[in-house]
Amino acid sequence: MTESIHIHLPIKPVTAVPEINTHVEPINPADVMLDIQHLKKVYPTPKGDFTVLQDFNLQVKKEEFISIIGHSGCGKSTILSMIAGLNELTEGNIILNGRKITEAGPDRGVIFQSPSLMPWMTALENVMLGVNQVFSHISKSERTDIAKYYLAKVGLEDSFNKKASELSQGMKQRVGIARAFALKPKMLLLDEPFGMLDSLTRGELQDVLVDVWTKEKITAIMITHDVDEAILLSDRVVMMTSGPFAKVGDIMGVGMERPRNRRTLIEHPEFYDYRAYLIDFLEH
Ligand SMILES: Nc1ncnc2c1ncn2[C@@H]1O[C@H](COP(=O)(O)OP(=O)(O)OP(=O)(O)O)[C@@H](O)[C@H]1O
């Protein structure tokens, strides 16, 4: 979907050279969980082959939170769908925990912009659908406990029995987040998870995601157009060059201490420098 880069806050005057340390240490090979090697993606089109990505390389550590940011159409969703196993690679490899990804699997949870819920089922039943499949070896009451635990974590303790069709867009996305965490994937893939929400709801859900992620520490890769969201959530922000032939342009380490939240973040002395760094990349 097409969307411009979000910049919500007034921009403090930018110093020419940011004072932050954006340096990223190379990852020890033993710590690499996801290894994307020389990824290339070509889409056939009526006008001929279109090379979206070429030589895209990225390594992700266990428990890291990575954001991918870049201009519309550069290939962010394409990368995520290939990690999810839903889109074929043209060249290169994606290796998760030492094994090549060839198809989708429960070790990767995906949160899309708009969760696909069964409208006639309750919030609880929607989460239970996946939990029943993935945890078929445990008792029904244990499965129900898992689903309820994560629904409560995202603030839906009073809405277990509400039908999905009766939920607001923000509540639906809360169910989507609960569902993804309840399945205990090794890796979470988030494709602009808050892109459809108004800014107030978006902010609330960013805090929900920070809270749940801080407790669970699931390795995560999130696509976002929102510079502030990327800084709030990420250990590293991957900046992509514009396509075609897009690849990693730069990577910014975010060294601000955790836990973070939106209110303390905007008062943090380094926040505006991280922001300036990202905006500078995106504007050039
Ligand atoms: N199945 C397809 N066939 C042909 N071209 C495609 C296909 N899917 C995506 N593309 C093209 O590939 C490019 C990258 O698309 P993709 O959705 O990955 O970009 P994106 O960075 O996620 O975009 P946005 O930020 O707008 O969501 C776009 O030019 C898009 O039109």
Image (tube, rainbow, N blue to C red):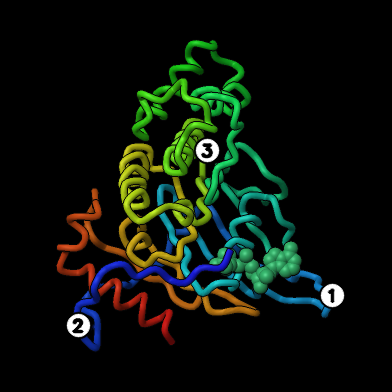
Q: Quadrant of ligand 1?
A: bottom right
User: Which numbered disc, 3 or 2, marks the residue closer to the eye?
Assistant: 2
Q: Residue at x 59, y 61 (%)?
A: 77
Label 2 near label 3: C-beta < 8 Å?
no
Q: Residue at x 61, y 54 (%)?
A: 83
Relative image position of residue 178 (x, y in whole percent): 45, 34
Q: Nearer the viewer, residue 111 or 183?
A: 111
Q: In this rendering, would 58 be left or right of 205?
A: right
User: Which numbered disc, 1 or 3, marks the residue closer to the eye?
Assistant: 1
Find the distance from the CA under tag 1 to the CA under tag 3.
Answer: 38 Å
Q: Where is 154 relative to 249, above or below? A: above
Hey, which quadrant is residue 81 in on the image?
bottom right
Q: Amino acid at mark 2?
A: Pro
Judging by the rendered image, the residue that carries numbered circle 2 is: 13
Where disc 3 sits, the SS reads: loop
Judging by the rendered image, the residue that carries numbered circle 1 is: 46
Q: Where is 276 relative to 261, above or below? A: below
Find the distance from the CA under tag 3 to the CA under tag 2.
Answer: 42 Å
Q: Which mark is residue 107?
A: none
Where disc 2 sits, the SS reads: loop
Q: Amino acid at mark 3?
A: Pro
Q: Amino acid at mark 1?
A: Pro
Residue 49 visible somewhere in the drawing? yes
Judging by the rendered image, the residue that carries numbered circle 3 is: 185
